[in-house]
Image (cartoon, coloured by chain):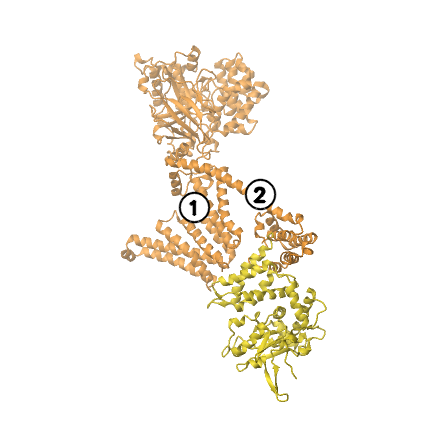
Chain colours: A yellow, B orange
Amino acid sequence: MNIELEPKEITESAPIEQAMTFEGALSVVNRLRARLRSQVLGRDEVIDLLIIALLADGHVLLEDYPGSGKTTLAKALGDCLIDDKPEDQIAAIRRIQFTPDLLPSDVTGSTIFDPNTNQFYFRPGPIFAHILLADEINRTSPKVQSALLEAMAEKQTTVDNVTRRLDDLFFVIATQNPLDAAGTFPLPSAQLDRFLFKIKMTHIDRAAELQVLASIKTRREGAPKELPKVTRTEIIEARKVVEDQVHLAYEIREALVDLAEKTRSDERVLQGVSTRSLVLAVPALQARALCEERDFVSSEDIEALASRIFSHRLEVAPGAESAEEIIKECCKAPLERLSRSTLTRR
Amino acid sequence: MEKTPLTTKIQLPLRAVAWAMASLALLWDVLFSGGLWAAMLGAITGVFFGTRLSRSPLRLIAIVFLLAAAFLLSWVFSSLLVRYSFPASMLGAARTLWLSAFLRYFVSSCAVVSLLRSLSLRRPALHALELSLLVACFVALFAAHRDGVIARPLWLGDWAWRQGIDPAVVFLWLGGAFCSLLIWLSLVETRSLKKESPASRLTWVLVPVLVALAVYLLRSVGLPTPKTDDPLGLTKDDDREHYGSEASAAKQNQEKPNQQDPKKEQGGTPSKPEDQTNGAKPQDTNQNGGAKPDPNGTPVKPNDGQANNTGGTPAQPQPDSNGNTPAQPQDANGQGNRPDNTPQNPEQGGGQPDKPSESQQGSGSASQPDSNGGGSSNQPSSQETQQNQDSQEPDLNNQDSNSQQSPSPMAVIILGDDYSPPNEVYYFRQEVWSEFSGTRLVSTSRADADQDGLSTFPTGPTSLPAAPPQGRTLVHGKVALLVEHKKPFALETPTFVEPIPNPDRSRFLGAYRFESMAQTIDYKELIGKKAGDPLWPEELQDYYTRAPEDPRYKVLALSLLERLPKERRNDPFLKALAVKEYLDENMSYSTKDRHAGVDDPTADFLFGDRIGYCVHMAHAAVFLLRSLHVPARISTGYAIPEEQRQGSTILLRSNNAHAWPEVYLEGVGWVIVDITPRTNLDPPGEPLDRDLQRMLGEMARQEPADPHAKEREGGSAGLGAMLSFGLSSLLIAALLLLYAAKIWRRLAPRFSSPRELPRVGYRTALDLLSEAGLSRQFGETREAFARRLGTFPSLRKLTRLHLSARLGDPKKSEGAAFSKAEWQESLRALRAELSTNTKPWRRWLGLFYPLSFFNSR
């Protein structure tokens, strides 16, 4: 059985009867949110960021301690998805546990010789999934990391000189453990750049933790049946809505550029915000506006997302305070200017 | 402690400066310069140390004890340093003293300031204590300066004088500077000033500008006049007895009725046949009403003794009481006149029979019904008394009060020429009494007599009949009045008077300049001059020699002539000298004996106990001289010894009031022959305050020591007035503009187009909030601001409307964001929320705060 995936096949999505409306995209968001929240308790903010990243076609790096619910989160997300194109044989969710001895082919898949047919055929690796949980990404060798990162950036992978397209909805949730740094291969900043968000998860609050303990059993059975899922196509459509229907005002773009300039001229920063990250920021901002039921990007979105998007892209001078703080400070003047601009005559 | 670096950056230096100044102010009079420096340094250190201390983990009580211990230790140690000899032997005595003081004041001021600092930092409520102590330190320095008295600190006042600046101005500016410093401090302390806001930047500038404006306006409004009890006594005195209002009242009365009242009120009286009596009548009434004292009513005998008496003794109605109670005047008149009149009438002939008119004067109770004349004359008398009380006159009778109270300054004379009078006394003539009224002399009613007298203050250049030029020189001078006078006065025999601008409105009531033909001829050269003026008509000659008919005067006068060599007995001036000699030797001066209550005070004085004062002496002298047919009269005013002149400045005080006799010598005019008794029964008066004299002189002269200072002052005064006017009008204009902008911004949503509505409407909402003190912070997004004000749900809605219109797709210009109804409803809701969520006083305050919209961002 030849299960080699033709790129053509993968990219072709089911024909859409009707373009999705803003309200339709909003309902996608709401369904995702409801299901995820029922499964992962006390992580509302992370869930929102995850949805934003999903809609903005970005990837997420979770920096977290073991046992804080990363896998639960990723699995819950996978559980939300209905694969409405089962013929492409792409799984809804895959998980790779990165170890130092992992090989690129363990991630991407490899060609295998079939003695029955005397032919090589491609056996897709876990990367061929809608949602990929890359656990402890810093534990594996740069070779493997770069294999994954190529896939993340280009949505394609090359095995044996054959480039194969991944699914349009290719969403990576990578994690790394801030502790136990010995023997790890920290991601270089160029690779960190591939992640839209780097989310530092803190411990959930007491009430949420108590609730987690109380609801072990019910949650083990999965999300309640009555909570509707979303289809893969719907997510793709929602991405289009985000791109087309959420207005990005000139003032907002100006504020983004101001912010970038501010970080570049800051003494505490060695390498400021790159243009690529600004480009990546735009859909994220739009996605957040959608999540907030707004059809325009507002200053609030910048305030909420700036440190998530930019802080891991910043090279901070030694001895300076954390990148988050710097970003927050750098935000103030552009945001002030933005806020004032709304009161001036156009 | 401090949240923003700005507050720390500015607050500490500000505070250090304030405390250093405060310690300087507090200790200025106490310490020498080393100690002062120590105290200032200590205060500055204390500010920083206290701030540091308050941030230390030490408990407040520990800090208090620590600082108290440091304070005590420094005192103990510094006194030990001075007590024992070995430090002195090691360091030298002077250095030891200096070190001891330095140590003591450095440590103690440091301890006190740090204590206050840390108290106020740890317990914010105690900051009030710190600030009020700070204020108290300054107030203590300038406390003596209140009410416009320029007293302390002398160094500053002296310095200002030297620079030609009114010290009051210097003190005002000092106060203003300190005021702005305090305002800054409290603004910084309450963190009302934020670095980012332009309004606060404006405030830094605005505070001193406003304070400067206030100082300027205060200057143009006028400074307070010093009070009565001020140490300089630069004021009117409310204490009537001090000024002997009786006497002044008397004088006024006599002059007024004589010159104006009789004609006005009595109408026909002068023309009546019994014009002596009738003529006397109105005068009497008036003057008696005023203060029975003197003059006119009683013929032969100078009456002032009685006048004084009545004035002085409570038993008899007084001018004061006249003034106060309408019923009194008549009594006063009655009682006052009766004694006068009874003797007078027989003598005058007309007297007794004139019952109707006399009785009105004589018996107060009966007077009213008697004659309209009396009635009408009574009325003015009381009025005049009241007037009299308002003004001060040189007081001839009040010397007794001088012994208890220091004489108060009355006027300042600046002489324009170097003139020394021949008998070393300056005579400033105010009034002339020459008309014999039965017992004493009063102001003349003749037009041709006493033409050299000044009756009213000049309103323009006024020339007087020229005095005979022989033996006289022209003297220019300037008079600045410190108290109100009824009549002007000038150096004897004035020829010209003219009002001049008041050199210093806060000190003087008025000023004029005079030109006088003052006597220079030596008294010796007067011997041989003829008496009187050949140009005088017979009547006038008679008028000036009319004496009482009491024969004793003539007898005494003739007996005096016997002392002169026979061939010289007809010389008028020698006659006068003989009279003067006699009076000088045989009379005793005392203000105690007023010869009151007698019919003829002059006779009572001259032929009685021979104790009296200037008025008695002058009357006695004039009556004696007139009985020798020498034209003589009395002048009153001020007499002041030449030795009391300071440079060109003469300070006239109340005890310089005087009356003196004058004789007329042909070619020379009226020559003063003053009586100066050898025996003075009164204690010596208070010596003249030379500093005061100099200071007042400087003021009256208005010529600063520095010749350029005048120009500068003139320039700066004009500039200052312009500046203050310009500034205040600018300020008012700015204020109006701000209010107009405020109102426009408030009303704009009603008139704006839907396109502009989201901007204009939201601006109004922000204005409303900022009036209540709620405004977005720097860098805060609009949504975050709306979230922060959770009690204003309509703000969220407004924000959403605003942002969707401004940041949303510009192609959409429909919908809620552009609906006027929507905006107005939301704004109404916001107003309702404001009234429930904020305090009314805060809203009212915000409503009137013109800059509130600067905070709505």
Choose mark 1 or mark 2, whichever is in front. Answer: 2
Q: Identity of the amino acid at label 1?
A: Leu
**Can residue B112 be seen?**
yes
Q: Where does the image place residue B350, in percent across and percent down from the top left?
A: 51, 13
- Count up the numbered dots: 2
In the image, B419 versus B725, the foreground residue is B725
Alpha-carbon distance for marks 1 and 2?
39 Å
Which residue in the protein does label 1 denote? B141
Q: To which chain does the residue with label 1 belong?
A: B
| Residue at position x 46%, y 60% in the image | B54
Q: Position of residue A202 (x, y in %)?
A: 57, 71
Q: Chain of mark 2?
A: B
Q: Up-down: is B273 above or below B320?
A: above
Q: Secondary structure at mark 2?
A: helix
Q: Position of residue B744 (x, y in %)?
A: 62, 46
Name the quadrant of the C terminus of chain B.
bottom right
Which is nearer the N-term, disc 1 or disc 2? 1
